[in-house]
Image (cartoon, coloured by chain):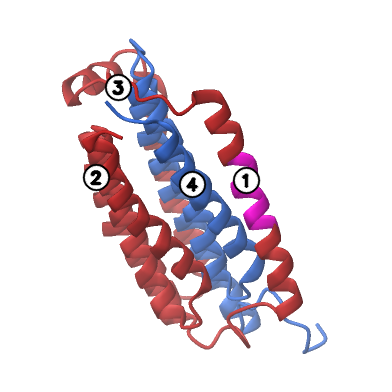
Amino acid sequence: MTSRDVLFIAVGLLTAASAVLAVTSRQVLHAALWLVVSLGALAGCYLVLGAELVALVQLLVYVGAVVVLVLFALMLTWEGAGSVDAPRGHRVLAALVGVGTTGLVGGTLVAAFGWDAVPVTGPDGAGVAVQVFGTWVWPFELLSLLLLAALVGAVAIATDGKDGPQ
Amino acid sequence: MITPAVPLLLAAVLAGAGTYGVLARRHLVLVLVGVELILAAAGLVLVTVGQVAPDPLASGPVLTLFVITIAAAEVVLALAVVLALYRARGHVDAGYEGGGS
């Protein structure tokens, strides 16, 4: 148990607890706010793991943009569902599938990597930047096209064509 | 030094919570919250493996950046569809049973 492990367990418990609250809270707004806590704490997890660039992008994109979008969508569709959760039997089945997923994914990954402590050898910010604009430059440029397509598509879907000036 | 099993177990918990959220929620925006948690679990696995396994291409952090960007594009389109559905039907209830049409 290294000091990095202790730090990670502290931040990770916060992440896991707020993620569970985000999917179980009965209040829609509280669920979205627990998602903020969970994704923000996940950025802390990335920091503890030594991936500063990913942590900052996670904060900017998820906590800054995606969650605000989710909050706006929630406020626009406030009365959209009769009840927030599915019926009780349905929820029990969903919980079984969720626990099964956790066991399967966790068991497979721990079996693959084991319980031994290993040194953190990931690249620093400069190393990531060199690779992004070297090896990964074409997928990276393709992402800008994807974002443009998503922007245009979202506007086309969300407006029904009758809102513009006549 | 770090034990990679701890972050990987956290990723498993996030994936399980996200799966539960996708299956057990009726409000479509909250279903998307579950999808976000599953994508966060995928990113955590990528970052962890990228930090403990030597890799000259830095594929762990770079692919996590790609996953975060693609998730942002995905959630924008999905929320646009949810808004269009709300305008057309007046509800965003995944378990809606009344109303006929």
Q: Which mark is residue A132?
A: 3
Which segment is the magenta one? A97-105
| Whether marks 4 and 2 lie on the same chain | no
Residue kind at label 3, given as amino acid type: Val
Please give the residue where the numbered disc 4 appears in the rendered image.
Answer: B39
Q: Label 1 amino acid? A: Gly
Q: Main secondary structure of the magenta part?
A: helix
Q: Is residue B83 visible?
A: yes
Viewer-nearest of discs 1 and 4: 1
Closer to viewer: mark 3 or mark 4:
4
Q: Is residue A92 above or below residue A7?
A: below
Residue to which mark 2 is pinned: A7
Q: CA distance from mark 2 to mark 1?
A: 24 Å
Res A166 seen here: no
Contact flag, marks 1 and 3 (Cβ < 8 Å): no
Tag 4's secondary structure?
helix
The mark nearer the N terminus, 3 or 2, is 2
